[in-house]
Image (cartoon, coloured by chain):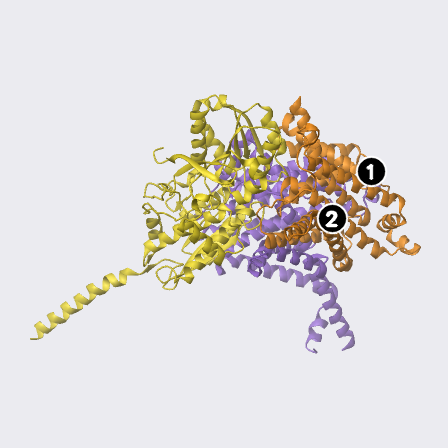
Amino acid sequence: MLVKNLLACASAALALALAAAPAAAQKKYDPGASDTEIKIGNTMPYSGPASAYGTIGKAEAAYFKKINDEGGINGRKINFITLDDAYSPPKTVEMVRRLVEQDEVLLVFQPLGTAANTAIHKYMNAKKVPQLFVATGATKWNDPQNFPWTMGWQPNYQTETTIYAKHILQTKPNAKIAVLYQNDDYGKDYLKGLKDGLGDKAKTMIVAEASYETSDPTVDSQIVQLQASGADVFVNITTPKFAAQAIRKVYDIGWKPVHYLNNVSQSVGSVLTPAGLDKSVGIISANYGKDPTEPEWDNDPQMLEWRAFMKKYYPDGNLTDTFNVYGYSVARTLVQVLKQCGDNLTRENVMKQAANLKNFDTGMSLPGIRINTSPKDFAPIEAVQLERFDGKGWVRFGNVISNDAQ
Amino acid sequence: MSAVAPVAASLSPGVSRHRLQWTALAVLLIAACALPFLVSNYRTFQFTLVLVYAIALLGLNILTGYNGQISLGHGAFYAIGAYVAAILMDRFGVPYWATVPIAGALCLVVGFLFGLPALRLEGHYLALATFALGVTMPQLLKNKALEHWTGGVQGIVIVKPDAPFGLKLSPDQWLYLFTLAITVLMFVVGWNLIRGRVGRALVAIRDHPIAASAMGIDTARYKSLAFGISAMYTGVAGSLGAIAIQFVAPDSFVIGLSIGLLTGIVIGGLASIPGALFGAFFIQFIPNIADQISKAAPWAIYGIFLIGFMFLMPMGINGAIRLGWARLRHRLSAQRKGG
Amino acid sequence: MEAFLHQLLGGLATGGIYASVALALVMIHQATHLLNFAQGEMAMFSTYIAWALINAGVPYWAAFFLTIAFAFLLGLAIQHFLMRNLRSTSVLQLVIVFIGLIVIFNSVAGWIFTYTIKDFPSPFPKGYLFGQKYLSPHELGAIGVTMVVLTLLWAFFRFTSLGLAMRAAAQNPVSSRLVGIRVAWMLALGWGLAAAIGAVAGMMVAPIVYLDPNMMAGILLYAFAAALIGGIDSPGGAVVGGFLVGVLENLLGAYVVGNELKLGVALVLIIGVLLVKPSGLFGSVQVTRV
């Protein structure tokens, strides 16, 4: 009798234990995550020479507020801690250390700037904290073997200019190419992509290169230099302010090259309108997201949703600035990753889920362009589509070109 | 109040200040040594940066505070020191502790050589020349010709050293103590320099250049020497800073750094050694505090801090402390006489 | 040859920008014997005010003159409430105050108006004049405006008793007071005029480089160099210096050292000139008593 009771108790206890074990294993937290909140860290240049990018951080913060208003992610509110690093790598190091060691965030999301991310690259991987969806197109973020805690998001710069190079080889094989580039990591990465894409012909086809510094008042002199080289193709690797100056000057001096403009500066609101819409006709660029000025998306439900979001949560934001679309899209990607994590909010699982995105549509992705990641592929977006400006908006042409094969 | 009187009575004016200063210094040193064990690694890292800036500010103070030569480009020497450390560590495998004196020596020479033509320039013109140096340095670092060494726009990543001899210290703690040792050394050397013949010559040249040369002081030599020594200090600071941050890139050494250093010595107190430390605290922590006060316009808050400090403490923090101390002593001695 | 001409004339265009800002620097120096680096940011801020007015529907020239008035009052206010109450006379302490002003104006402008670039209108007609493509109508007009301001400034200092009083107050405040000049008002007036000139410069510069809070940062360095090489006490020298720096920059960048090092080399050359002629090309030699 006693033995039977004991056995019954033991099996009941065992059953309870087995039942409880998965329940206990269900919720796992690393620093920064709890039942009620998820702490996300970020650094952005809200001041200094790159302050125009600060609007990305604001758009992201606004989106997280929207998510919180709607109940959060699996019931947890997002605590988005964003700090200004003034585009100075030592400041980035200090701020990221603060986020990781003092604020104890779960992950660092979208730190902006190639130099900034290079400065924290080893640290983040040594500390095993996700450096997720970095806001730079440099090629080195897709290296899961050596840096398993770092992941990019946008198509890298080299991919973009390689695609321009191939387009030039296809359409104008005898072209003489002039390049204007910003003299920093971003500019040089784009330039490398162009040269790699042209291959052996780079030396003969590129007849002029001119660089500029962000402290230069204008790039007018460089444009004149490039025109003087006799080039008939112009690859414009500039940030918004200088892109606008370059576009206007090219038109004003009567130079009519085939004009390729890098994706960073293709915003109609921030670049083409100040430059002059009539002066921007014919410019070719590449995009992977929906441009708010393209009439094609005027009644697109996702675009309408974005506009409503901007109106409610970021009313100061510019509705023609693609930076605000960018911030919205990356934020949505992060929310998807966190949703996929469920109750297992460990840093390891965050990276695992980030490497487990299948055909994810941020809502603002172009048709045919979806986010795909895997443990060997840390480049979420690898495809772009070429587009041409017709005076009113960007018109896409050709097929979606993917870098997956390369 | 009457309890103060016996204390004041036992301190005669000349000795009291001296003894008090030494006691204060000893307390400070002990506190500084104990710091890394009392606070987090992150704070230790921040305090390491404070020490780094203190060395740089002492260097700039020697030039601008004591010798009156304005420099708007000292960030360039900081950059040279940083890159020397990075290149030696990354490309040549030189141990970190050896890079510091090499950086200092190189900057001593470069600074001296820069000081030579700068002899002919004064005031605005010297400001422009040093400004030119500060502005051009990032360009030089990005230059294609030097890319092989400097890493160009990509910069150089270096690794923080572990504590030696298997000591149970984190890299942050060890680096802090290492930096502290060098800081103390540099401050002692600087203090001796200022107190001695060189320092007196520098100050004489600053205040009465013509009288100084009439008295037989070789102004040209001392002015160039001032440049060299101050560059050496800043170069040492740069190398330590690079090791602490573990990364150097041209973007880290823009003109804002030079302006920040100048701000540091004025806020801390021109022509004062403690001023270098106060200034270092200011330029390291006030921007963070400003950021917490206002997310919308943090640099406006920083600017208000700057202007406010100049209003309230035109002689810098050190000047304000000395003034306050003098007033306190005056009141104490008046009490003693009266009560 | 055409490219060379283009660079030369383009250099005059950017030189015009530097010249106009250099005038503001010279003005403030004439009045206070200080080089107020914050002139650039004050000019930028005034230009934003103009932009806001124009955006609100105010016609260009009304906004132009309202902005000048605003800038004048701003300069006056800063001198009267801030500078006058500073107890220090050391140059370095004042430099820190100027740095403080710079970051305040920059940060507030970014906060109120955001960092996205804005297009600023030009009062001059569109369409290149005389069939040439080197200088746009605005660039020509900006140079013209700079010349007008220069002439007014020169006439003010040369022919009016007020101008004389201002120069006296800056050079020797004690003696000036003895003669009955109200030094405090002279300083305030000087600040106001400098700010007003800066506002004009900003409104001429913005259509060329686009309006954003960091608009003046790069220009200020060139303007500083231009003012020094022309002679810090010579408005005409500042303008010549501006054109010189603009052309030098372009030619160095296109033909000599390339775009990366042109700033450094330009500054080295300017310093070289200053070593030979320390008071600048047109400045008067300062004699200090021992």
User: The N terminus of chain B lies in which quarter of the figure?
Assistant: bottom right
User: Which residue was labeled with disc 1?
Assistant: C283
Q: Is residue A103 above or below residue C231?
A: below
Q: Are marks 2 and 1 on the same chain?
A: yes
Displayed quadrant of residue C259: top right
Q: Secondary structure at mark 2?
A: loop
* Residue name at image x 85 percent, y 45 percent: C156
Left or right: C283, with B107 as reference point? right
Q: Which chain is yellow?
A: A
Left or right: C78, with A157 as reference point? right
Per the model, the C-alpha gap separating discs 2 and 1 is 19 Å
Does label 2 or label 1 sit earlier along the sequence?
2
Circle 1 packing at 10 Å, graded few (<14), some (14-19), many (20+), is many
What color is chain C drawn in? Answer: orange
User: The C terminus of chain B lies in which quarter of the figure?
Assistant: bottom right
- On the question of residue A241 being in view, the answer is yes
What color is chain B drawn in? Answer: purple
Residue C153, x across and y down, in percent: 82, 44
Name the foreground residue: A40 vs A289: A289
User: Which residue was labeled with disc 2?
Assistant: C36
Q: Is residue A14 above or below residue C246?
A: below
Left or right: B65, with B239 as reference point? right
Q: Amino acid at mark 1?
A: Gly
Q: Amino acid at mark 2?
A: Asn
